[in-house]
Amino acid sequence: MSKTDFLSFLVPPLPYFIEGNFTTYQKGDWHPNRYNLGYFDVIIIKEGMLHIGEEDQVWRVTENFALILEPDKHHFPIEACTEQTSFYWFHFQTNSTWCAQVLPNFITPSAPIPELHFHSEHTTIHLPKFQKVVNPQELFAKLDYLLASTLKPRKLALWETQQTFVNIFSSLEYDQSSKNSSAKLAEQIEIYLKQNYKNTVTNKDLEAHFHVHQNYLARCMKAAFQRTPLEYLMDYRLEQSRNLLLQTDLPIQQITEETGFSQASYFSRCFKEKFGVSPKNYRQQYWRPSH
């Protein structure tokens, strides 16, 4: 197993396409030697082979395989091409949080998306750093369309290019069905907690719902989210209460009830432990009189 097996991206926002092309090397040609390129470099081989290194990792990228090189690392050729080699390449970047990791673990957002209205949930997209393309001819057709779209009038090119890129990005995503059972269970627990945070939820409730011992539930959540189910629930409730304090005029007692806390005094204590101020003072920090 390589030191980095997955590149994981917190979305939204989605990554975006910068540039790309289809390139053919002849026998004896070398791939560029580059430091700190500044964006992700995706290489997808149509025929032939590239022998490429990144820091202390090395890959032989052959027909129908894809490799993603990271923006802040040293990329270099191991040897010249031994045969004619044709490949697609494209560069992309993201303004969101991303990380390189051995396992496809979730990225916890620093600030959750407000959930008072219809919204898009934060999620983590995992791309294998090195993978065999599942449907290469379909992907090649998408890549051809991506490159051609950049030649259209500017406004039309913007939308078509980025939409096609997102489609390609999705094609390279880690197959969610291959996740291990503990990761799948952690996702199910997360959904359950978000759907029931206004109600009383105990470890016994979780055991009864998932038919699994609470210790195993905690291990799954700790592995995926670095928190037990009840720790995750507490953080989620507090984030929802913060949103209500900032975006509504609801009294503290009602916010207490809306976010699943049994008593206003307990809610205030938990809120202050997390955010350093009481709910009332937190709201006052951001309150402005209307004119």
Image: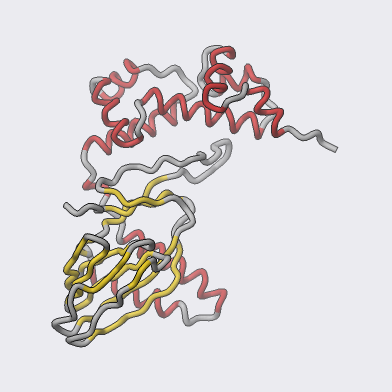
Can you say which quadrant of the picture contains the C terminus?
top right
Q: Position of residue 43 (x, y in %)?
A: 29, 70
Q: Position of residue 135 (x, y in %)?
A: 23, 66
- 81 up-or-down from 265: above or below: below
Badge count: 0
Q: Residue furthest left?
A: 82
Residue 265 visible from this viewpoint: yes
Q: Which residue occupies 32% across, 68% down?
A: 42
**Residue 278: horizontal and vertical position, in percent?**
62, 21
For image coordinates 57% across by 74% down, the residue present is 155
Residue 85 figure quarter: bottom left
Residue 141 screen position, x and y as percent? 31, 75
Report which quarter residue 241 is drawn in.
Answer: top right
* 223 to 173, vertically: above or below: above
Most foreground residue, 140 or 241: 241
Taking 154 as reference, is 255 above or below it?
Answer: above
Q: Is residue 142 visible?
A: no
The residue under the point 47% across, 20% down is 199
Q: As drawn, is 140 to the left or to the right of 240?
A: left
Q: How is the image coloured?
A: secondary structure
| Front residue of 229 and 194 | 229
When the figure is inspected, residue 130 is found, relative to residue 113, above or below; the finding is below
Residue drawn at (32%, 15%) of the image: 204
